[in-house]
Image: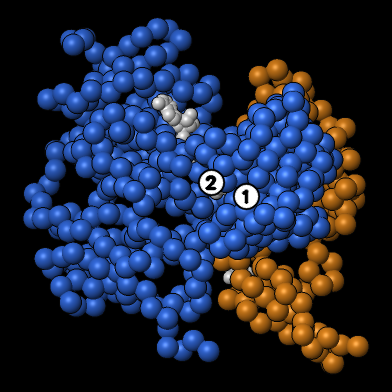
Chain colours: A blue, B orange
Amino acid sequence: MNKNAKTYDVTVIGGGPAGLAAAISAHEQGAHVLLIEREDRLGGVLKQCIHDGFGLLRFGEKLSGCEYATRFMHKLEETDVEVRALTFASRIEKTDEGFLLSLIQSSGFEQVKSKSLVLATGCRERTARQVAIHGTRPAGVLTAGSAQYYINILGQLPGKNCVILGSGDIGLIMARRLTLEGANVLGVYEAKAEPSGLMRNIYQCLVDFDIPLHLSKTVTEVHGRERLTGVTVSAVDERMNPIPGTEEYIPCDTLILSVGLIPENELAESLGVKISRATKGPECNQDYETTVPGIFSCGNALHVNDLVDYVSESGENAGRAAAAYAKSGHEHRLKSVEVKTDKNFGYIVPSHIDLPAKDSVPFFFRTSKTRGRTRVKAFMDGKEVFSKVFAGLRPPEMEKIEIEAAKLQGAGPLQFTMEVDEHEQ
Amino acid sequence: MNSKEGKELICIVCPNGCRLNAAMGEDGQLSVTGNKCKRGEKFAQAELTNPTRSLTTTVRTSFSTMPWLPVRTDGEIPKKLIGDALKELQSVLIEKNLRCGEVVLTDLAGTGINVIAASDL
Ligand SMILES: Cc1cc2nc3c(=O)[nH]c(=O)nc-3n(C[C@H](O)[C@H](O)[C@H](O)COP(=O)(O)OP(=O)(O)OC[C@H]3O[C@@H](n4cnc5c(N)ncnc54)[C@H](O)[C@@H]3O)c2cc1C
Ligand code: SF4
């Protein structure tokens, strides 16, 4: 091991909104912080998110994504956090004193030591390989994020006549962006019976521009040798199997995939961090500490968020906790309590709570399917510790609730339930 | 004559995205339901008379490190002027460094609304 390796209290990996918030909050706790970003500029995915709607919860303003990131970058500039861009954390080992990181940067290879880690590596998009589409692999098939990069960063239109597969938010945003840039968006096709993006995006990105949304339909085949010439779309049944005889050929030169995001956790997995099957991100406690002591996770690496405001909040919590861990290790812990849900939940974060908990504990959850008036309750040792009615729940919309730490003192587990509210008309 | 059914709208003012129903009463008064707050009413009123949107896009720069600068309107402009606004922005070329929030263009398409940089350059 390198004896002269520089040592930090907290190393944050990833310079998107989660990493920026984590680095700033760890610094505010007095920690000596290193922030690592593999790209040349900080900001993460927000660099290419030129549309607005970011920061309404935090700043009460409708900022564009880049503007939101810039606010944090300005704040970071006022700190002495060491920022290394164009630096890739290729390998991390656990040691007796903490962690040893192998960094690849333009100046060469370097190893540094850190007492704690915050993994803020974001998420990646599902690609054509992860959805079943037959046919060739011509040019003109790309993810919504790549299309966003082409248009907003490079200033290039990926095609003239576009079909969008999947009604995720990035696809909806791109439908509008492509239209404003002069492309023809022929339609958005969604295999599920309901859209997976936010209603407000359906409204302002599709309805505003008369772009049709086709539900329960999917792309089953792509055509074209070098360049895409068209796609076949088919209706699907409830099990998402294409219905024979419903095929329709649509000539187009571009197919944009907006079929979901998956947390990026290669580094976490290599460190033995346990990954949740529900969120595809690390299992964690209320401080976003993973199952490996001293490793924290936040932002879209932890679970895919729909509002960046919550991404920053998770970064702040993780950064603060990582700084505390670096200073004095863990406070005395009484026990760890599992957080469980009934089948009506898509998922809930955190997956467990380490007691004693402080102040109030935020929980983020998604419903497994669309529901009307619903009461969400939580029980501990048979006692109700939380109850709230939601006017409606939809899987694309993440919900946040808080429970006072004082109520979370039983033996556990903490059980969440959903039921139809009696007052439902 | 007067549709009692009303029009289905989604309020885009905040992340709640309330589903609104806006119906024009016989007295010419708009009645809005489904809104969690007052801003929803104002939104519905505008949607039925003069819908407005903020506009975000990119403008060309002379810098090779960042050839396109993200910009946005610092307020909302009438939806029907978005085409004109985009055309006007196509001819903009930024040749000096800017800070996020600085004005790039004033009085976009005659709306009185300014266009500001959404990133440092
Ligand atoms: C294409 C796309 C578009 C999106 N559009 C929206 C949107 O319109 N609105 C919205 O609210 N949300 C959007 N999201 C979700 C968005 O990702 C979050 O709002 C937010 O940007 C997540 O922040 P983050 O910091 O967790 O991740 P990111 O912004 O993804 O940042 C992660 C950073 O980590 C870096 N990194 C990863 N691995 C390493 C490594 N090993 N070493 C060094 N650096 C590393 C990456 O380069 C990146 O900069 C979008 C996501 C994607 C993928
Ligand atoms: S009505 Fe109010 S709460 Fe509902 S989306 Fe509009 S601004 Fe938000």
Which disc is residue A166 wearing? Answer: 1
Residue A380 lies in quadrant: bottom left
Q: Nearer the viewer, residue A8 or B4?
A: B4
Tag 2–tag 1 contact (CB < 8 Å) = yes
Disc 1 residue: CB within 8 Å of ligand 1: no
Residue appearing at x 76%, y 60% in the figure = A207
- Whether callout 2 and callout 1 share a subunit is answered yes
The residue beneath circle 2 is: A260
Residue appearing at x 15%, y 73% in the figure = A381
Q: Is residue A307 left or right of residue B8?
A: left
Residue appearing at x 24%, y 13% in the figure = A5
| Amino acid on which the number 1 mark rests in the picture | Gly
Q: Secondary structure at mark 2?
A: loop
**Relative height, residue A31 to residue B44 (above, below):** above
Q: Position of residue B12 (x, y in %)?
A: 66, 63
Q: Position of residue B13 (x, y in %)?
A: 65, 63
Kindly identify which chain the residue marked by label 1 belongs to.
Answer: A
Q: Residue furthest bottom?
A: B27
- Assess disc 1: are there few (<14), some (14-19) or many (≥20) residues with their C-alpha within 10 Å of its C-alpha: many
Q: Is residue A351 left or right of residue A375?
A: left
Q: Residue furthest top?
A: A108
| Amino acid on which the number 2 mark rests in the picture | Gly
| Residue A27 visible to an observer of this rendering | no
Label 2, label 1: how far apart the Cα atoms are: 8 Å
Residue appearing at x 29%, y 40% in the figure = A296
